[in-house]
Amino acid sequence: MRIFLIGMMGSGKTTLGRQLAGQLGYTFVDLDEYLVQRQGQSINQIFEQYGQEHFRKLERQALEEVVQKYDKAVISTGGGAPCFFNNIEYINQHGTSFYLDVPVEQLAHRLLAHGLQERPLLTGKSPAELNLYLTETLTHRKQFYERATYTLAGANTAAQSLLRLLN
Ligand code: S3P
C-alpha cells in the first residue's frame, strides 16, 4: 500500500509522513528530497536554472519512479505536485491519498517561522504578500487537493486521525 500526503507548503506533509512511516514500518519518501538527490541540485537551483515548467516535468518523472520503486511507502509530495499533468489521478491510481487541509493563517505562520528560503515560490515575500499568495494559490489548488481519497482537517490532529483511520 502506498500512502500519499498532499497539501500546501507548510501543511506538515513531511513531518506527518515521517512519523507515519515509522509507525507503519513503511519506507518514507519525500518527493522533493528524492528529486534533489536525483538531480544533484537543490529545488532553488532547479527553479533558477530551468524554471518552474521544467521542474514540474521532473517532479512528474520523480513521482513515477517512486511509484515503481516502492509499494509499501508513505510518500509526501511537493505542494504543487497533485496540480499538474493530472498527477492527482495518477496518485489515486497508485495509492491512497490524504489531503492535509490547514488554514492559510497557520500555513503562513509556520512558513514565516522557517521555510521561505528553500522554497523558490516564496522567497522574498513579505508577510502580507505571503498571505495573499497562499490564499490565491489555495483557491486554485483546492480543486485538485479535494480529489484526495481522504481529507484531514486541522494540522495538529492530522496524525492522530490518520493513524486511527489506518488501524
Ligand atoms: C512547491 C512546494 C514545495 C516544492 C517547490 C514547489 C509548490 O514542496 O515542491 O518549492 O508549488 O507548492 P513543499 O510543499 O514540500 O514545500
Image: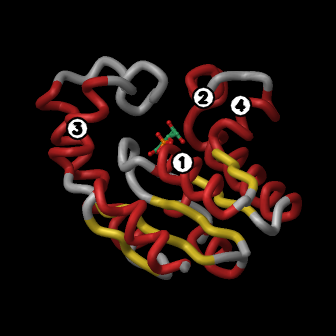
| CB contact under 8 Å: marks 4 and 1 | no
Residue type, mark 3 in image: Ala
Marks 4 and 1 sit apart, C-alpha to C-alpha, by: 12 Å
CA neighbours of label 3 inside 10 A, class few (<14), some (14 to 19), many (20+): many
Q: Secondary structure at mark 2?
A: helix
Residue 27 x/y as whole percent: 75, 54
Which residue in the protein does label 3 denote? 108
Residue type, mark 1 in image: Gly
**Is the distance from the Cβ of mark 3 to the nearest ligand 1 atom less than 8 Å?**
no
**Is the distance from the Cβ of mark 2 to the nearest ligand 1 atom less than 8 Å?**
yes
Residue 89 x/y as whole percent: 61, 77
Q: Earlier in the sequence, mark 1 or mark 3?
A: 1
Residue 90 x/y as whole percent: 67, 74
In the image, what residue occupies the spot 64% across and 45% down? 30
The numbered disc on residue 78 is 1
**Colouring used for the render:** secondary structure
Which residue in the protein does label 4 denote? 36
Which residue in the protein does label 2 denote? 43
The numbered disc on residue 165 is none
**45 up-or-down from 100: above or below:** above
Q: Earlier in the sequence, mark 2 or mark 1?
A: 2
CA neighbours of label 2 inside 10 A, class few (<14), some (14 to 19), many (20+): some
Q: Secondary structure at mark 3?
A: helix
Of the two numbered discs 2 and 3 in the rendering, the one whose residue sits closer to the viewer: 3
